[in-house]
Amino acid sequence: MGGEWPGRGGRRVVVVAAAARGAEGVQKDLVGTGGPVGDMETDFNLKVVLVSFQQCLNEKEEVLIDHYLDGWKGLVRFLNSLGTVFSFITKDVVMKLHIMEQLRGGPQREHYQSLQSMVAYEVGNQLVDHQRRSRYADSGCRTVLRLHRALHWLQLFLERLRTSPEDARTSVLCTDAYNASLATYHPWIIRRAATMAFCTLPTRKGFLEAMNVGPPEQAVEMLGQALPFIEQVYTISQKLYEEHTLLDLP
């Protein structure tokens, strides 16, 4: 997923150098490679992730990219703690996180402080192609759109998990959320593999316990308090992309 795209004045700006190698480094950070994996799993809990999304919005209701990326890193940790069932999603997310971190640390970093400033900069400088994927494959707008879609799936799944009865099948809850969101953008073979993988999910009780916030009922209560923040971030991002006709970037 490496590539270049033109900056101001026709200059060529390298956006992602050695993306695979960089993404591997992000993946190591997320799953705890290079440090005690057990310690990371013990210290992790979903409340920390959801606090990141709570901090995403400033007083102007702008989505702050650093907090957005922090929230996603935590979500990847959480999903990876459940095994490989979500790897078809998390591997792509890790690549997208790496691209965004390159942009946040690059020469145009001031334009990537919020989603709003990013969209204004890339749209204003014609760094977004509505027709061809290859021209600006690593643009911030396209990259965040993929994270945005995945966040919708996770939001729907966690809400279903929160409101479902104790004997609900997590495979059904996850599949329903997937079909209502990410499945639209995946080819048939990935949709088929995903629904088969969801059959290996732990029970609802096991899923809630994996959040490391206490017994299942406490996890449910925490989700009820925190999910509205994820929904608000998603809604504001959705409106921003809709206003600029960015929801269908190839």
Image: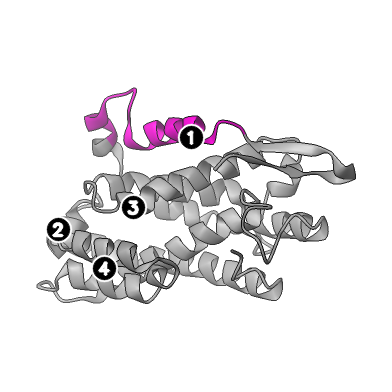
**Marks 1,3: beta carbons within 8 A:** no
Q: Quadrant of residue 179?
A: bottom left
Kindly report the distance in space between the C-alpha atoms of the residues bearing marks 4 and 1: 29 Å
Mark 1 or mark 2, which has the lower sequence index?
A: 1
- The image shows residue 6 at horizontal and vertical percentages of 78, 44
For the record, the magenta segment spans 17-40
Q: Residue under circle 4?
A: 174
Q: Which residue is mark 3?
A: 88
Q: Amino acid at mark 3?
A: Phe
Marks 3 and 2, how far apart at CA: 14 Å
Of labels 1 and 2, the one closer to you: 1
Q: Which color scheme did the rendering employ for the protein? A: one colour
Q: Is tag 4's residue or tag 1's residue first in the polypeptide sequence?
A: 1
Q: Relative to residue 183, is residue 132 depicted above or below?
A: above
Q: Which mark is residue 20?
A: 1
As shown in the figure, which amino acid type bears the numbered disc 1? Ala
* Disc 4 to disc 3, C-alpha distance: 14 Å
Image quadrant assignment for residue 38: top left
Label 4 vs 2, first from the N-terminus: 4
Badge 3 density bin: few <14, some 14–19, many ≥20, Cα 10 Å: few
Look at the numbered disc 1 and give the secondary structure of its residue: helix
- Residue 20, compared with residue 174, is above or below; it is above
Q: Amino acid at mark 4?
A: Cys
